Image: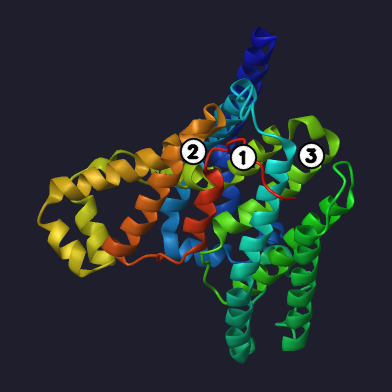
Amino acid sequence: MKSNLNQQFLIVGGIGFLVLFFLEGFISELIFQKSIFSDLILRFYPTLPEKLNSLGEEDISFYINQLKLRWLAIVAFSYYLIRFTAIKPYNSVDNQSVLWKIRLFYIVQLVYLPDLLQELRFRGQWKALFEPLLLFSFFETSFPLEYFIQVIGILLFAASAILVLVKWEVNDFKPLILSIFIFLAWTYLLSLFFGFGKIDHTYSSLYMGLLGMVFCRYYVLNDSQNSSKAYLLFQAFIWSCYFFSGLEKVFLSGYQWFQSGHFQILCHLHPTGLCEVLEKQPIVGELLLILALSFQLLSCLQWRFPKWGYVNVFGGIAFHLGTWLVFDVGGWQSPWIVMLLFLWPMSNVKKPV
């Protein structure tokens, strides 16, 4: 079985690598030169000319050359998830404990929903500047009226309250439907939030948790005896935010991430008082960058070793507080820090349902 799995991933990875390798020139031609496909590309990616002007041909070519390597990274990560799943992630945990944590998650997302609605209310004052994201442009032609956003918020609160307060049967499908609705509603609100030319990562782990919870609820619905594995899957959506962020640093910065002077560059981009102090100790700054990247890349170990969650929780708190204090990015009240609590390894403590 293991041998067949190894062969399948080697074949898929190798074929994909070769296809992307031989298509590099063709992809570059489609992007940089006029062809019969140019109009088709612009229809699906209308901001491409702007990207070409801002990044330049050299950087775009760099990204194209990386496609084959990114493909290998995705294949290797998929192999890791399938091959090295924790066999008994939380062997002594009962289903009621898992359902209690699911309810707690939906309470947490309600805590941050008013902030998002308030942000949308403020941005509505500049609705003339709204440009829908590409994926939503087919139905988002303009910024909606405030009352419509309020209705979405009320429905979100209602669906979340029902999930939290109602005692469901384990095999009931209604919690799954409510989970899907909550995820889609957040997707819509965030698409409005990002429709003013700036992508904000504040809600990233919270949003990924909402998506992960859909799969978690589906898993519980179809295999109620393995709810601990369903919760392990939910956790994967949270720590994967850190893993892929670290992987992106590797692809974009490479060895330059570890070069002397990198910390000073970041300090110049995000000047703070603490940064000025650490800038005089370059070894300390470089060590902090290495520790941050190591934490992100190693976060995936929780998939195989659930108790690695202790490292992810404390490492994540240090990571976010550190970036806030050193670079003034984020803050202690960020949803990122609260979402780390769901990475805490579970114990068999009876909770009310």
Check disc 3 and report its element: helix, strand or loop.
helix
| Disc 3 target residue | 220
Mark 3 crowd level (few <14, some 14–19, many ≥20, 10 Å Cα): many
Residue 125 locus on image (x, y percent): 60, 91
| Disc 1 target residue | 349
Q: Nearer the viewer, mark 2 or mark 1?
A: 1
Residue 93 locus on image (x, y percent): 66, 33
Q: How far apart are labels 2 and 1 at the CA level?
A: 17 Å
What numbered label is drawn on residue 296?
none
- What amino acid is at disc 3? Val
Relative side of 36 to 298, left or right:
right
Viewer-side residue, 111 vs 40: 111
Q: Which residue shows up at 49% across the image and 38% down it?
A: 309
Q: Earlier in the sequence, mark 1 or mark 3?
A: 3
Give the answer, above or below, for where 126 lies relative to 33: below
Kindly give the residue lying farthest to the bottom in the view shown: 125
- What amino acid is at disc 2? Gly
Viewer-side residue, 118 vs 100: 100
Q: How far apart are labels 2 and 3 at the CA level?
A: 21 Å
Q: Which residue shows up at 59% across the image and 40% down it?
A: 236
Q: Please give the count of numbered marks on the rendered protein.
A: 3
